[in-house]
Amino acid sequence: MAKRALVGIVMGSESDLPVMELAAKALDRFGIPFELRICSAHRSLHATLDYVKKAEARGIQVIIAGAGGAAHLAGVIAGQTTLPVIGVPLASSPLKGLDSLLSVAQMPGGVAVATMAVGESGARNAGVMAAQILALSDAALRRKLVSYKEALASEVGEKNRRLQRRRP
Ligand code: RP5
């Protein structure tokens, strides 16, 4: 039987999926069960609110919300839940994500969204951030995160060694 999702990855449009898959990939790497949903703060507000209202009772502990343009999805969700909400601004409009970044980050006091970088790095980091939140109460997951950080460092070391061989 599939494990109950701990993280909800929501996005404003199907067109956001290729980037938001990177959040899913990061969670997969740590073995964290998640679910993916398309729901929009503007085009399907009622479905979004319905999802948020039921999420905690279903076992969701962190919500990742990715949207582009006037990206209100993460903020609308954060206004309706005490679960941690991680916002991913997407570069899907002619303004290339600056609009989304400001929409996700500039929340009014009292309603917190943890805003990631624009685009692919942000989506990947949203998965890592969700893992770090969950690791606060999961020692095995914390160990996986420690190895992940070590792997990042050794990748850089390897690239540096390759460069030194080419350009001593
Ligand atoms: C936002 O508008 C979505 O999050 C997406 O990034 C953007 C464009 O959506 P589509 O027109 O491709 O559905 O709400």
Image (cartoon, grey):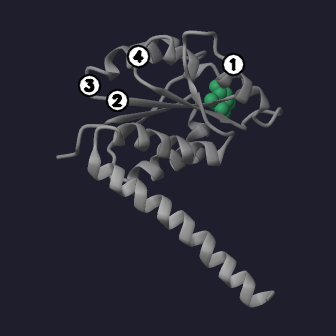
Mark 4, residue position = 82
> Amino acid under label 4?
Thr
Residue at 47% across, 51% down: 26
Crowd tier of the residue under label 3, counting other residues whose Cα lies within 10 Å: few below 14, some 14–19, many 20 or above: few
> Amino acid under label 2?
Gln
> Amino acid under label 3?
Arg
Residue reaching furthest left? 1
Mark 2, residue position = 61
Q: Earlier in the sequence, mark 4 or mark 3?
A: 3
Residue 104 left/right relative to 111: right
Residue 101 falls in which quadrant of the image? top right
> Amino acid under label 1?
Gln
Verify CB contact (< 8 Å) between mark 4 and mark 3.
no
- Across the whole image, how many numbered discs are drawn on residues? 4
Ligand 1 contact, mark 4 (Cβ < 8 Å): no
Q: Residue 60: x, y in percent?
A: 32, 29
Q: Residue 75: x, y in percent?
A: 57, 18
Q: Disc 4 versus disc 3: distance between alpha carbons?
A: 14 Å
Crowd tier of the residue under label 1, counting other residues whose Cα lies within 10 Å: few below 14, some 14–19, many 20 or above: few
Mark 3, residue position = 58
Q: Which mark is residue 106?
A: 1
Q: Residue 122: x, y in percent?
A: 61, 42
Residue 143 left/right relative to 156: left
Point out the quarter of the image occupied by ligand 1: top right
Q: Earlier in the sequence, mark 2 or mark 1?
A: 2
Verify CB contact (< 8 Å) between mark 4 and mark 2.
no
- Position of residue 167 relative to residue 65, above or below, is below
Residue at 37% across, 53% down: 30
Q: Secondary structure at mark 3?
A: loop
Q: Disc 4 versus disc 1: distance between alpha carbons?
A: 18 Å
Residue 45 left/right relative to 93: left
Q: Disc 4 versus disc 2: distance between alpha carbons?
A: 10 Å
